[in-house]
Image (cartoon, coloured by chain):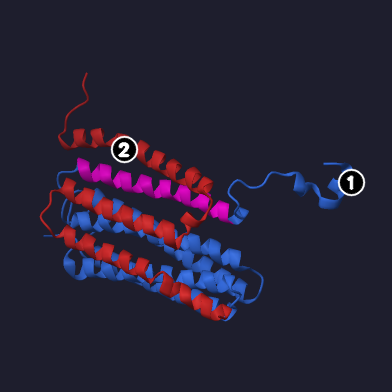
Chain colours: A red, B blue
């Protein structure tokens, strides 16, 4: 097989991932028009977005093919930073109900 | 290592092997992606804070044209990731012509994405949405929408320019397959971020 033929096959190899990502996008729109509460819809959409993100990281960005040490350095750090950002929610709910700070 | 061995092998041999076994430019782009993920995280959490704290957050996005437009934009961006995979693979195989075709296809798809995005912006501006006011409710809707989608659009524009520079350099033999792979990782990250922007910014604000 020539180098050119080999390079053409990679698109076919990743077509299942491509269609899975398109399907996730369509599923998100489908669920967005179902009657869920905002919290439930947020959870569903985030779960689907995480699946799409994981597919992109694993197959498109080839993180799964790198050494495990790279994955263990990068991903827990991002998750930690994003979890730290969750401290804002109690204040945003307080603002919604216009509750003053306790004295 | 003796002095004579050092003279034969150079000082590099005394250095430790990289713990990640990847070229420095690839490690650099991964570190950039980590910091950029935190930046987008801040924007999306800030948007979430304001949306939760507002009782009159606007829900302006109709199925037609907004959501159809977003679905087309998503398909275009995911397709551009596929063409970028083809470009990286062709570059690694040493097929310059094929890599060039895939790279310019990716650029074209990136330009189409940016055009559709700007069209969406103008449609909202026509409806009266500005950074700090809009006809429907919380005045900060425009600030968050334009900031998040604008930051993403800036990444797409920067990516298109970077891919064009690398496509030219690779065709002329100044740059190698490693450079194509590095810009490819960046481009897939732009795609990945869009997967979170669509549900959080558009689909949670549907007009019913």
Which quadrant, please, contains the C terminus of chain B? Answer: bottom left
Q: Quadrant of residue A49?
A: bottom left
Which quadrant, please, contains the N terminus of chain B? Answer: top right
Specify the subunit that label 2 lies on: A
Q: Residues within 10 Å of mark 2 (few under 14, many from 20)?
A: few
Of the numbered discs in the image, which one, if any, rests on residue B4? 1
Magenta stretch prevailing secondary structure = helix
Q: At x 23% / y 60%, what residue is drawn?
A: A28
Q: At x 43% / y 64%, what residue is drawn?
A: B156
Q: Position of residue B49 (x, y in %)?
A: 26, 42
Residue B9 visible, this orientation? yes
Looking at the image, which is closer to me, B80 or A10? A10
Looking at the image, which is closer to me, B33 or B58? B33
| Residue with the most extreme front position | A1
Q: Position of residue B142 (x, y in %)?
A: 27, 54
Q: Position of residue B44 (x, y in %)?
A: 32, 48
Which contiguous range is marked in magenta? Answer: B26-53
Left or right of A47 on screen, residue A56:
right
Mark pair 2, 1: CA separation: 58 Å
Looking at the image, which is closer to me, A66 or B42? A66
């Amino acid at each position: 097989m020539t180098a050119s033929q080999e390079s053409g096959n990679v698109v076919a190899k990743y077509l299942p991932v491509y269609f899975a990502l398109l399907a996730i996008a369509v599923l998100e729109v489908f669920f967005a028009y179902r009657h869920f509460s905002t919290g439930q819809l947020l959870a569903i959409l985030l779960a689907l977005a995480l699946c799409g993100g994981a597919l992109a990281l694993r197959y498109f960005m080839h993180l799964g093919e790198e050494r495990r040490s790279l994955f263990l350095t990068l991903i827990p750090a991002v998750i930690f930073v994003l979890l730290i950002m969750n401290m804002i929610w109690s204040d945003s709910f307080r603002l919604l109900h216009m509750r003053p700070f306790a004295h | 290592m003796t002095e004579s061995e050092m003279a034969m092998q150079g000082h590099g041999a005394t250095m430790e092997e990289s713990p990640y076994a990847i070229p420095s430019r690839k490690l650099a782009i991964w570190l950039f992606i980590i910091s950029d993920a935190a930046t987008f995280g801040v924007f999306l959490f800030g948007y979430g804070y304001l949306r939760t704290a507002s009782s009159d957050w606007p829900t302006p996005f109709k199925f037609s044209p907004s959501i159809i437009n977003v679905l087309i934009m998503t398909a275009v961006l995911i397709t551009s990731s596929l063409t970028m995979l083809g470009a990286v693979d062709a570059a690694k195989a040493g097929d310059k012509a094929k890599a060039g075709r895939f790279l310019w296809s990716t650029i074209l798809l990136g330009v189409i994405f940016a055009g559709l995005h700007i069209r969406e912006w103008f449609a909202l501006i026509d409806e009266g949405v500005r950074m700090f006011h809009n006809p429907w409710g919380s005045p900060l809707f425009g600030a968050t929408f334009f900031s998040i989608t604008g930051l993403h659009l800036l990444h797409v524009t920067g990516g298109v320019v970077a891919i064009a520079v690398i496509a030219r350099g690779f065709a002329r033999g100044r740059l190698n397959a490693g450079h194509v792979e590095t810009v490819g990782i960046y481009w897939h990250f732009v795609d990945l971020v869009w997967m979170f922007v669509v549900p959080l910014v558009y689909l949670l604000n549907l007009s019913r």
